[in-house]
Image (cartoon, rainbow, N blue to C red):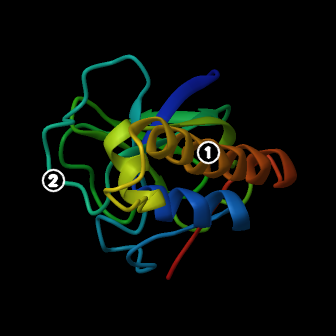
Amino acid sequence: MEMNAIKLIHVTSPWALESILASGVFHAFSGHPLNGDSGLNCFLLGQPGNLGQRFEGSGAALKLIWEGPVRRAGASPRLPLAPNILHDSMPWRCFIPVDSDLCRPRIIGFKIAAWALDEYIGFTCPFWYPHWLRKRLYRRAKLCALRRFRGLMQRRQKYLKVAGP
């Protein structure tokens, strides 16, 4: 088992990202230790993970740092997975089980795709407005949303709790 700082990325939707940043908690789909998705799925930042798979939510990414122990788990790790350990099953995924209270990932940033930000703000404007005004109103709505995300990140605790539903 290794111990070093590892940068991770969790793919999610802008709405889920907002909830995570506001509460400091990621709620897993399941809390049962024998369920393979009872925790936080993530990828090593900058490494080619299986990003072609279908995600529940997409368009946004939460950037994290893991400073705890890491276990190379292989493609099909034996369940239940031990808490407080980053289980590395790359290139498929990395995984942090629920109730990992001794070691928590630290939130270091986020990223939102332009198309996802457009969906998030849901900007509509009457077609008869001049182009320059539509563009200005759209830019204002976009900046307001980004300021909200940045503000949530600055106000919240820096460590993410991985909890059950």
The residue at the point 38 percent across, 37 percent down is 114
- Label 2 environment density (alpha carbons within 10 Å; few <14, some 14–19, many ≥20): few
**Which amino acid lies under the numbered mark 1 shown in the image of this protein?**
Arg
Q: Mark 2 highlights which residue?
A: 54
The residue at the point 56 percent across, 24 percent down is 6
Q: Is residue 47 above or below residue 20?
A: above
- Label 1 environment density (alpha carbons within 10 Å; few <14, some 14–19, many ≥20): few
**Which amino acid lies under the numbered mark 2 shown in the image of this protein?**
Arg
Between 77 and 12, the one lying in front of the other is 12
Q: Mark 1 highlights which residue?
A: 140
Q: Locate residue 102 relative to residue 133 in the image: left or right.
A: right
The residue at the point 46 percent across, 38 percent down is 135
Name the image quarter holding residue 83: bottom right
Between 129 and 11, the one lying in front of the other is 129
Q: Which mark is residue 152?
A: none
How far apart are the two marked residues, 2 and 1, measured between alpha carbons?
32 Å
Q: Is residue 5 above or below residue 119?
A: above
The residue at the point 48 percent across, 64 percent down is 15
Let me know if residue 2 appears in the view. no
